Image (cartoon, helix red, strand yellow):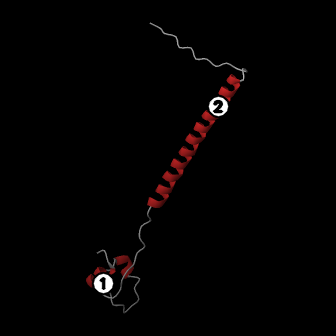
Amino acid sequence: MQLPEDQMRAGHIPADLYRRLPPGSDVHKVVIVQEAPRSYTGPIVLTLVITAGAVTVLLVLAFVVHIIAAAAVAVISASGGISYTINRSKHT
């Protein structure tokens, strides 16, 4: 029974609620409405979005710091203040 109308047509009242009905109530006209179970979809999606956003911000920040450091090394190297070489040795 998914709909209250189905419950009303069947006259189905759970036993624990049947005892709470006022005397003289017609059980065929009593409809019990229950609250829908809580949906966790919203909080889970929100957590995933926040996590993805934080990771994205950290990656962009690391990229910007890398670019700034490379530019600083290039400027200092061009001005003669520091030299930066990469030596690749072959081992056979």
Q: Which residue position is annotated with label 1?
A: 8
Local packing at callout 1 (Cα closer than 10 Å; few below 14, some 14-19, many 20+) is some
**Label 2 Cα crowd, 10 Å radius (few <14 / some 14-19 / many 20+):** few
- Name the element at disc 2: helix
The type of residue carrying mark 2 is: Ala
Residues at circles 1 and 2 in contact by the CB criterion of under 8 Å:
no
Q: Nearer the viewer, residue 75 or 57?
A: 75
Mark number displayed over residue 71: 2
Q: In the image, is residue 76 above or below residue 64? A: above
* Point 43% across, 63% down: residue: 39
70 with respect to 42 (left or right): right
Q: Position of residue 55 (x, y in %)?
A: 54, 44
Q: Nearer the viewer, residue 33 or 67?
A: 67
| Residue closest to the eye, 20 or 1 | 1
Q: Relative to 37, is 23 above or below?
A: below
Expressed as whole percent of the image width and height from the top left, the position of residue 36 reads 41, 70
**75 sits left or right of 13 in the view:** right
Three-letter amino acid code at disc 1? Met
- Name, please, the residue furthest toward the front: 78
Residue 84 seen by the camera: yes
N-term-proximal mark, 1 vs 2: 1
